Every structure is written in structure tokens, then in C-alpha cells.
Amino acid sequence: MIDEETLRAEGLLEAARLMAVAAKTAPKARGVDNVVTALVADRGELERLASKMEELAPLYGEFFKRDAESVRSSSAVFLVGCRLLKLGLETPKRWGLDADLVNCLVNLGIAIGSAVKTAQLLNVDNRVMFSVGVAAQELGLLQADVVYGIPLSVAAKNIYFDRKWPR
């Protein structure tokens, strides 16, 4: 007999594995793979990540504190990032943007969408968070130029739904 807590924990880890598959197989601009993923599932590492977010709040915004509480309440955090590659691309000058950065961000956006779609299909609650990615980069948890974090939860109620904005 396998108890409910074990079943949920194992299910969440399997969902995270499938999120990594979805992010990796998502379409990439020019077919160049610059997307990387990782999972933070250790309770101590989740606390370290949440603490770093709180530390960064005065610099980046008080929402980092609110998001840190979401990380503490989560079972794991899926990290997804992109590496800036020099592909020699050109964007129209009127855009005023670096083509390699655009390529990185577009690939990252598609990968994030694929990953959270997978989590949703598997009924794993999640929320895409810029703040988690910034803290993960500061801690060196994922070697990428841009990182986002996706906290994951399997609970009776979606813990990311009724979050309060800090005052």
C-alpha cells in the first residue's frame, strides 16, 4: 500500500520530469537549443531560494516577499532558462532590440508555455514567477542568462490563487 502523501510527491516529480521534456522539445527559433531546466525539490534548497527572494525584495520590489511565501508553500520549483547565443541574427533597426536577445526570450517563452501546459494537463498547480528566476540566478542554481521559476503544488486548493499583494 502506498499512502496518499507519497503518491502526490511522486506524481509531482513525474510531472516535473514531463515539464522538462515539454520545455526541451518546444519549438526553437532557427532550431537552436538554448533552453535549460532544473528542479529544486529539497526543502532546504527551497528555503534558501525563498530567503534569497526576501533579501532581494528591497532591490527589485516587495512582490519578491509575497512570492517567497509561495515558494515556501510549494513542493518543488521548476527552473527554466535560456542562454544567450551569438547567432549573427539581425533585427529591423526600428525594433531597437538585439536579435540574439529576442531569440533567447522567444525560445524561453515558448518553453515556459509548453512546461506549464504540461503541468496543467497533469493537474499540478503552478505559477510562472520572474522573482524566483532572479533569486535562482543569484544562487547559481541554473546557468542561464535569463531564468524563470515555476513553483509546483499538489494540494486540495490551488495555493497560488488567492495570494495577497504586499502593502
Image (cartoon, helix red, strand yellow):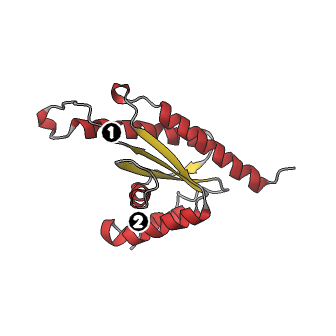
Relative to 58, 37 lies left or right: right
- Mark 2 or mark 1: name the one nearer the start of the chain: 2
Q: Name the residue under label 1.
A: 104
At which x and y percent is residue 49?
Answer: 49, 63
- Direction top: furthest residue: 30
Under circle 1, the secondary element is helix
Q: Name the residue under label 2.
A: 64
Q: Nearer the viewer, residue 137 or 71?
A: 137
Quadrant position of the C terminus in the picture: bottom left
At which x and y percent is residue 114?
Answer: 49, 36
Crowding around mark 2 (Cα neighbors within 10 Å: few <14, some 14 to 19, many 20+) is many
Residue type at mark 2? Answer: Phe
Under circle 2, the secondary element is helix
Relative to 38, 129 lies left or right: left
Q: Which of 116 and 139 is in front in this view?
A: 139
At which x and y percent is residue 14?
Answer: 65, 43
At which x and y percent is residue 78?
Answer: 52, 50
User: In this rendering, is residue 7 above or below 90?
Assistant: below
**Residue at the image position 51 percent from the left and 42 percent from the top:** 116
